[in-house]
Image (tube, helix red, strand yellow):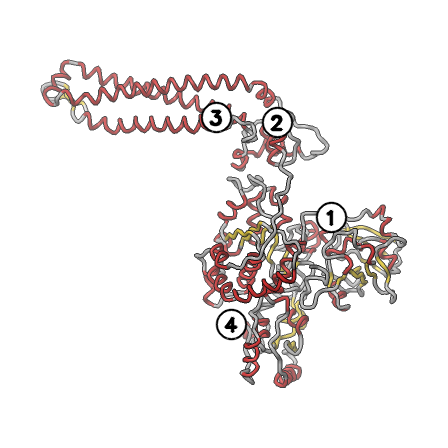
Amino acid sequence: MITVNPDGKIMVRRCLVTLRPFRIFIVGIGFFTLCFLMTSLGGQFSAKRLGDSPFTIRTEVMGALESRGVLRKMSDMLEMMVKRMDVLARLENSTDFRKGEEAHFPMDRFHPVVGLMERIQAIAQNVSDIAMKVDQILRNSLLNGKPIEGRRDQCEVPRDPKYPDCSGKVEWMRARWTSDPCYAFFGVDGTECSFLIYLSEVEWFCPVLPWRNQTAAAPSTKPPPRVQAAFQRELSYLLKLIGSGKESLIFMKKRIRHLATQWLQASHKLEQKLGDKQKDQKQILIHIGFLTEESGDVFSPRVLKGGPLGEMVQWADILAVLFILGHNLKITVSLKELQSNLGVPPGRGNCPLTVPLPFDLIYTDYHGLQQMKQHMGLSFKKYRCRVRVIDTFGTEPAYNHEEYATLHGYRTNWGYWNLNPKQFMTMFPHTPDNSFMGFVSEELNETEKQFIKSNKANNMAVVYGKEASIWKLFIGFGFPYEGPAPLEAIANGCVFLQARFKPPHSSLNHEFFRGKPTSREVSSQHPYAEDFIGKPHVWTVDYNNSEEFEAGIKAIMRTKVDPYLPYEYTSEGMLERIHAYIQYQDFCAVAALPDQSNSHTMQSSASPFRLQPNSTYLAWSGNSSSSLPAWPPVKSMQVWVSDVGQACTSTCQKHGLVCEPEFFKFINQKEVFQQLNIVCDSTESEMNHLYPAVAENVRECYLQKEPLLFSCAGCNTKYQRLCPCRDYRKGQVALCRDCL
């Protein structure tokens, strides 16, 4: 600080203290300069290789120009500081100043000030030298890259019929490329060429520019080498993968530990059964979306308070199965982990992933599916065939097809994903349009079964219900729907008494099902127990009919039952089923419908179908199946015609079979109508989830135009449907007899 004393003489007070923070500031400027040079110049030199980035040349030019500008500004700023220090130096040289200084301070106290000025001048000179060197590098770089830069300035939108959307996408980029930071992340800078490079090398709407590195732009099509999966039985490693921090995860880990012995015994049985059959190891991502904070995670806080556990029971078993079968797993329960594992670029989710998807399969739920679509950009459409959606109540094809659902009133908050309906995996096998995932129930050994028989209590019942509202029913039966508890009760030797619903509950008449992507009619509290187990273990009665209810109670009192568990709900059954899905289901290899204009292979003289002696159904001839690599194998197929107003699900069930939607593509031919002696005055091809079908009263036949709408579910009093049915293994309805 400079002040004037009473005698009019100038003096300096606390000058060095004032300069000290300034000295620190100068050191900071020097450090920032060094860091800036390391990042900017280092980035330029590392980007010299053409294959490193789709926008290498632009990065070099723009980054270097910005570096040169900043360096010049820093040099100017330092020169300004030096000039201001010169003013102080001139004040120091004045006589009065020197006398005042000698009176108050020793001369050696100003040596640091002189040294500081020298350092500032040295820094300014260094920055100036560096700026000159950068300028020289830039000139050489621009000179070497001038032909390419010229091409960049002259980019024109290609007119290639193979890329009809290119021009429209370029127009969109011109107007909206700043709407998401992910475009700048991939190098888009507002120039026409950067648009075309992005749309050809990051997305796939435009052809690659001729002067670009074609090898670098082309994705690698060579598949990774196959590795055989080996059964994994060290479950402690799985428990580490699951992690902790949420009560729901703690519950899952406890369940896996509790059933560990059961899982290990089942794995040895399945390993012996499979023998030397191929077991490809898969890279699998498991994202449990409903447990993420972004979805609300309403389950975890209620785990220990009587909340719903069915979903967590199923997810715990899914984790155990996928691990024991020998696959490599990544488990996520947060959006941040999901983005990291997928390779999501920074931004708002409009750009594709930064790297090819490293996973063969992704198991998730509807919440996770929505999160993936939001953050994967165009990559979601590209890779959605690898997704498997855990879906408790199922999704029917009419609700799954976005356009059809919107036009015909089937759109809900949970449907319209345009997936193959088999990608939805349910808790029970209530719709063959979806895949049956299931879960497992605890299995009793022979000693435990004998103990239950000898110690079973008489005249005792357990009420299966949840929440106070259900007691407004007769005695509380009827809700929840399709939970795991009845199977566990039956497996422990109990008889399950349940309510029959008249009329059946559905999305049309019951609030619980409203908005769910299915029109399935639920005839009882637990349709699987009613249809696949039945008496004497399961009794389904009308609670509003007192005589029927009383008769049922008396019959149960006279009945003795042993513990029973269907094979498909044992650990071995679930391992077997999921192994088959992983090895044989492939929704990425899209099979086109046969050409109906040239269907010589389906002519009666060479048809793969044979009308059976009773003339009511078609069966696949044995000598025609070897040329069709389909799964399930086509030799398990039978073709039946439904009654008017009957769905294919019930039609196949009536004949001891199950409807198989994978076979619709083989029967979607007018020649099949002829072989079944159905007269068609006209044959049309349309989008309708009931087709192929015939309106017999007017002799009009209809074929399916959209493969995603092939559906076992659905009926209409106007139509008789063509139904592809197949056999199934006892206790394992998801698999045909020759499916392994």
Task: Give the class, few, some or many, for how many residues have Cα within 10 Å of label 3's Cα (few <14, many ≥20).
Answer: few
Q: Is residue 65 left or right of residue 464?
A: left
Labels 1, 4: front one: 1
**Kind of residue sitting beneath label 1:** Ala
Evaluate if marks 3 and 4 touch, with contact meaning CB atoms under 8 Å apart. Answer: no
Real-space Cα separation, disc 3 to disc 4, in angstroms: 70 Å
**Kind of residue sitting beneath label 3:** Phe
Residue wearing tag 4: 468
Q: Name which of mark 2 and mark 4 comes first in the sequence.
A: 2
Residue wearing tag 1: 591
Q: Name which of mark 1 and mark 4 comes first in the sequence.
A: 4
Q: Position of residue 598 (x, y in %)?
A: 85, 46
Residue wearing tag 3: 45
Task: Give the class, few, some or many, for how many residues have Cα within 10 Å of label 1's Cα (few <14, many ≥20).
Answer: few
Q: Secondary structure at mark 2?
A: loop
Which sits in the foreground, 303 or 536? 536
Real-space Cα separation, disc 1 to disc 4, in angstroms: 51 Å
**Kind of residue sitting beneath label 4:** Ala
Evaluate if marks 2 and 3 touch, with contact meaning CB atoms under 8 Å apart. Answer: no
Labels 1, 3: front one: 3
Evaluate if marks 2 and 4 touch, with contact meaning CB atoms under 8 Å apart. Answer: no
Residue wearing tag 2: 212
Task: Give the class, few, some or many, for how many residues have Cα within 10 Å of label 4's Cα (few <14, many ≥20).
Answer: few
Real-space Cα separation, disc 2 to disc 3, in angstroms: 20 Å
